[in-house]
Amino acid sequence: MGEAFHLLASGNHEVVAVTVRSLGVSGSATLLAASFAIPLSLAIVLKSFRGKPVLLGFFNAMIGMPTVALGLILYLLFSKTGPLGPLHLLYNPVGIMLGQAVLITPLIVSFTTSALEAVNPDVRLLARTLGASNLQEAAAVVREASTGILLAVAASFNRAVAELGIALMVGGNIKGLTQVLTTAIALETVRGEIELGIALTVILLLIVFALNLAVNLFKRRLG
């Protein structure tokens, strides 16, 4: 433990590099997923169409998809003989980012949809009464559900940064290129480098706890 905290205090280059890469990959995955999932959630809540319960049920079910299963599917898609092989996404940070975005999209959709559905219907009614356009009405609903949406995005980032299956199977855990916190922890533990594994674990936990603390403080401030 002493050696692990020494690595943290000394700003070990390897520790810093892996941490920055993890934040970049998972942060990009979260932004990409949110840019698609939040508008989709709005459409699901504000529009009436056949099959809405089935669509919501699908996203809810996909939340529990094992990361290794999704990692295998993505591996087959990204491999040289796969349909997306020409894009060279396998063993590439971009491939990990896309995989994590796919993983967390159902989480954002499910949580955001619940937050939007919890908004008082009078908000939409008032917006229509004041002559708001469809876009303005949607913006009003999003403002009311902003706390829930923020929690959904934060939870999705935590899920992305802490997952192992996709990062390992799609990224290959290549040092200096695709190695992230979770894959580095697994590798260093197997190699017997327990001190480095503990240091990386501490950083991963600090990231998750710090984000949750920030979201809770923001939620209290809004409340």
Image (spheres, helix red, strand yellow):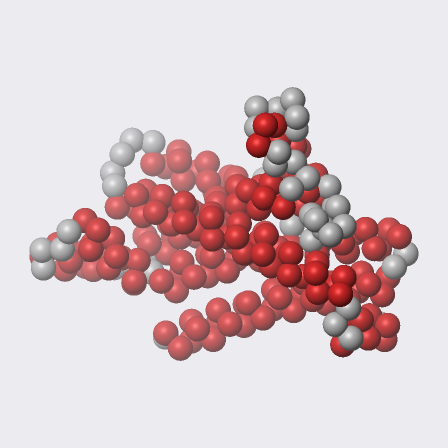
Determine whether, in the image, residue 27 is placed left or right of residue 149. Answer: right
Quadrant in the rendering for residue 204: bottom right
Residue 214, image x and y in percent? 51, 72
Residue at point 76%, 76% (across, down): 9
Q: In the rendered image, which quarter contains the N terminus? A: bottom right
Quadrant in the rendering for residue 199: bottom right
- Quick one: 119 or 133, which is closer to the camera? 133
- Quick one: 112 or 166, which is closer to the camera? 166
Residue at point 69%, 48% (across, down): 178
Residue 152, image x and y in percent? 46, 56
Quadrant in the rendering for residue 17: bottom right
Position above or below: 92 against 184: above
- Quick one: 48 or 140, which is closer to the camera? 140
Residue at point 66%, 26% (across, down): 80
Determine whether, in the image, residue 137 is placed left or right of residue 45. Answer: left
Q: Can you see residue 217?
A: yes
Residue 121, image x and y in percent? 22, 56
Determine whether, in the image, residue 206 is placed left or right of residue 200. Answer: left
Q: Hey, which residue is sitting farthest right in the picture?
A: 192
Q: In the rendered image, which quarter contains the C terminus? A: bottom left
Q: Can you see residue 64?
A: no
